[in-house]
Image (spheres, rainbow, N blue to C red):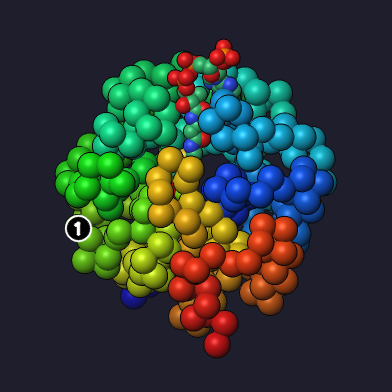
Amino acid sequence: TIPQRVKIVEVGPRDGLQNETALVPSDIKIQLVEKLAATGLSAIECGSFVNPKWVPQMADSAAVFSGIQRQPGVTYSALTPNLKGLESAIAAGVDEVAVFGSCTEAFSLKNINCSIEESLARFKPLMRAAEQANLKVRAYLSCAFGCPYSGEVSPLQVAKVARQLEDLGCYEIAISDTIGTGTPALVESVVNAVAGSLPLQQLAMHFHDTQGRALANVEQSLKMGITVFDSAIGGLGGCPYADGASGNLATEALVGLLHNKGVETGVDLAQCWVVGEFINAYVGAPKSTKPALASSKN
Ligand code: HMG
Ligand code: MG
């Protein structure tokens, strides 16, 4: 049996737009976030507080937070890599933050300029400050299904770092397929390994659809009892430090799959299609690698 209800974390305004070469104006981002909330999505990652020299696309995140009309019951969150980022996020009025670490040393270095151990050390003061500010902290764990720089990753390594993030106090760990190399068989191994050291309820799955397997990976995760999935409206997305990571799993495709299986999401699918078209008009033609999005339209 699969879960009756699933929570979707919409990451389009962050994971999606951070990877678009087109700089989307703040007022369009604000409209995007408001339209996403109107579809019934209850968790929306709106931006990140990182070095703007590294990711200029997210440099206006504070403006996005100050511009949005908030809906009750919706959590508006942002990525924060360190204490400096957290302080900016608090000043901008975020509801929740997320740290992001990696299973591999090579990706950690490229993405956040430090080793895995150093990243965990940087998260410690952030966690303390977040607790004082009454903010919950989510964690992303990149390269759980393979690394663009060092190749295959052992499920035990994923489990180890996931456990370390949980020990720091992160309430949810998003096991992330940064470059879309996951397969249902690999999902089975990784979820089993991680579930050996963490409660399943604390896991979320974050699939990129680079190779067209995101939906199959969601189905496998559902069978294993996972109840939280990340997706990006319009299949936007990727990571600027992982070539080929273009295309998060599209929210439209995820919602369509879940509703077909009788799983409740609280999200209006028809409205999602409208919002996906709205934002794709600003970032140019859909990328070639959006298989789940294409297949869900018919
Ligand atoms: P660093 O150079 O090691 O940081 O970068 P530092 O502490 O040595 O500071 C150097 C400079 O950065 C200083 O400025 C700091 O003020 C500034 P300067 O004096 O040179 O002018 N700085 C900051 N500025 C703004 N906000 C901050 C901040 N911190 C330092 N928070 C750092 C470390 C993490 C900051 C850098 O590597 C960075 O910004 N990386 C961004 C990486 C990123 O955003 N990647 C994309 C998101 S992750 C992702 O997409 C994967 C995910 O979707 C899951 C998956 O799919 O795998 C989550
Ligand atoms: Mg991602």
Q: Position of residue 257 (x, y in %)?
A: 48, 76
Please determine whether, in this image, residue 98 is positioned above or below residue 36: above
Please determine whether, in this image, residue 187 is positioned above or below residue 166: below
Residue at 58% across / 27% down in the picture? 53
Left or right: 12 in relation to 71: left
Find the residue positioned furthest to the bottom: 298
Q: Judge by depth and name the residue closer to the eye, 18 or 132.
A: 18
For the C terminus, the image quarter is: bottom right
**Residue 287 in view, yes or no:** yes
- Secondary structure under tag 1 reads helix
For the N terminus, the image quarter is: bottom left
Q: Position of residue 89 (x, y in %)?
A: 64, 28
Please determine whether, in this image, residue 295 is positioned above or below residue 60: below
**Mark 1: is the Cβ under 8 angstroms from ligand 1?**
no
Residue at 66% across / 49% down in the picture? 22
Please determine whether, in this image, residue 23 is positioned above or below residue 265: above
Q: Judge by depth and name the residue closer to the eye, 79 or 222.
A: 79
Left or right: 146 in relation to 213: left
Q: What count of labels does the image hold?
A: 1
Residue at 49% across / 60% down in the picture? 247
**Residue 174 in view, yes or no:** no
| Residue identified by numbered label 1 | 189
The amino acid pointed to by label 1 is: Ser
Q: Judge by depth and name the residue closer to the eye, 193 or 47.
A: 47
* Other residues around mark 1 within 10 Å, as few (<14) / some (14–19) / many (≥20): some
Residue at 57% across / 58% down in the picture? 236
Q: Position of residue 101 (x, y in %)?
A: 38, 34
Left or right: 88 in relation to 226: right
Q: Position of residue 42 (x, y in %)?
A: 64, 55
Residue 223 image-quadrant placement = bottom left
